[in-house]
Image (cartoon, rainbow, N blue to C red):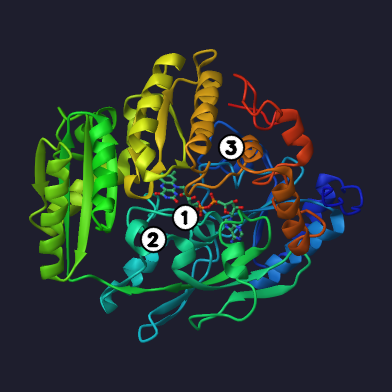
Amino acid sequence: MSAAPSPAVSPPEPCSRVAARLAEALRHGAVITRSEELKPYECDGLSAYRATPLAVAIPTSEEEVAAILKVARETSTPVVARGSGTGLSGGALPLTDGILMSMAKFNRIVHVDPLARQARVQPGVTNLRISQHVAPLGLYYAPDPSSQIACSIGGNVAENSGGVHCLKYGLTVHNILRVRAITIEGDAIELGSEALDAPGYDLLALATGSEGLLAVTLEVTVKLLPKPELAQVVMASFPDVESAGDAVANVIGAGIVPAGLEMMDKLATRAVEDFVHAGYDLEAEAILLAESDGTREEVEHEIAKISEVMRASGATDIRVSSNDAERLRFWSGRKAAFPVVGRISPDYYCIDGSIPRGALSHVLKRTEEMSGKYGLRCANVFHAGDGNLHPLILYDANVPGELERTEAFAAELLELCIEVGGTITGEHGVGIEKINQMCSQFGSAELVQFHAVKAAFDPVGLLNPGKAVPTLHRCAEYGAMHVKAGQLPHPELPRF
Ligand SMILES: Cc1cc2nc3c(=O)[nH]c(=O)nc-3n(C[C@H](O)[C@H](O)[C@H](O)COP(=O)(O)OP(=O)(O)OC[C@H]3O[C@@H](n4cnc5c(N)ncnc54)[C@H](O)[C@@H]3O)c2cc1C
């Protein structure tokens, strides 16, 4: 099988002409071209990589999105859609010769149907706002990334985002019904339907997690769930991370599916406790937080079962939240953990890989060994129940060589995820960050098919090019399948 042929594109037009055409196309939206105003758009949450786009376009209507895509098409200029820029894999990193299209003005909740338990929302609406908006109806939107106060539903769809409650309620893909989008060619498409099933191929699932490579999302229909009568959290302390890892496998093995099952190691609990005062056991090498929700009887029964399994797996202390304020306090440290590690390290690098739950204790042990090998501290805070790891490597970008060692550490960890039968991404996407490891995860035949899917939606290759799916040429160069220290995912991108 050969690689998908590159479509013929005309040479790009000078930046100033593209910006002028954008300004002509937008009647109400804004076009930013001044270098100091472009600065906030230079990176997403993966701030080690930055690039200045030739212009930022901020459309206010679907007509303006179509007009921007028309300019892009006619001038052969790449376009990167951006939600809130909280992505951690560089998905919304601009291209220096491209337009960055911010969807921030698409921030309306269009319609709520409490009977059907659905809401139609624009892509720039933040994840948390949906739940806040429908709370008076006794409803909520289940996927809850820790960034939910800021991240947009358009970004959630593009990354197939998860969160604490996804163990029981599923990822974004399981909680949306329909996406309306526009292709680079200006065609409006409807993926899925507001009924429970849609005819034809499941293109909604294909588009969810496609990292802005296939189309620009204009509207999302999300499912809403009734708020459970009661929720309680078990907080269990463990003398080592391995026994905490085993406890996770044992809980699931006992047939329990908690509403959330998260782990934090000692480095993480110590970092967050001073800030959030969640009441974590600072002597424990690891703590587990397991939530149960449902009717009062269901919760009582499940909490007792979870506590029993935790104790049998070696828990040294178990506490159960006695009211909702305490439950939220237990979660507060977990939710704030990523930014809060900034208190103990100038920089951190958040990795996202998934592994079979049974491999947890092995992978945590290997992570500790790698931490010693690279001479870098690593805090573990993660969705343990889903086997979705988030090792946070702590480094100082101002110390020569530390970022390079961090990248090599991260690459080795991702290769370990593949080795134990897992994947290189759990919920943060591939972006530019993990593009080399895609070459290890997939063979050339699969990558060729991924390019064919992209070409079916975007034959001119202008939507977020260079992200998520590596070229075969790149994989051939990566060859040895191991990143060498200092090797950038994109050597041409400046690093700060
Ligand atoms: C502190 C912190 C905690 C986090 N916790 C979690 C977590 O628990 N779970 C989790 O899954 N993630 C988490 N993330 C990662 C991030 O918040 C998610 O990936 C989120 O979905 C990104 O949304 P965004 O609006 O910021 O998207 P952006 O970062 O702006 O973009 C992400 C991708 O979506 C594409 N995109 C955005 N909008 C559109 C659109 N309208 N049409 C087409 N493509 C689009 C972009 O091109 C890009 O590829 C966390 C991030 C931070 C900083």
Q: Secondary structure under badge 1?
A: loop
Tell whether label 2 touches label 1 (CB within 8 Å). Answer: yes
Q: Secondary structure under badge 2?
A: loop
Question: Up-down: is 170 above or below 380?
Answer: below
- In this picture, residue 193 sits left or right of residue 182: left
Q: Residue at x 10, y 62 (%)?
A: 300
Look at mark 3 in the image and give the residue it sits on: 433
Look at label 1 and name its amino acid: Ser
Look at label 3 and name its amino acid: Glu
Of mark 3 and mark 1, the one earlier in the sequence is: 1
Disc 2 residue lies near ligand 1 with CB under 8 A = yes
Distance from Cα at disc 3 to Cα at disc 2: 23 Å
Disc 3 residue lies near ligand 1 with CB under 8 A = no
Q: Secondary structure under badge 3?
A: loop
Disc 1 residue lies near ligand 1 with CB under 8 A = yes
Distance from Cα at disc 1 to Cα at disc 2: 7 Å
Question: x%, y% of residue 226?
Answer: 28, 75
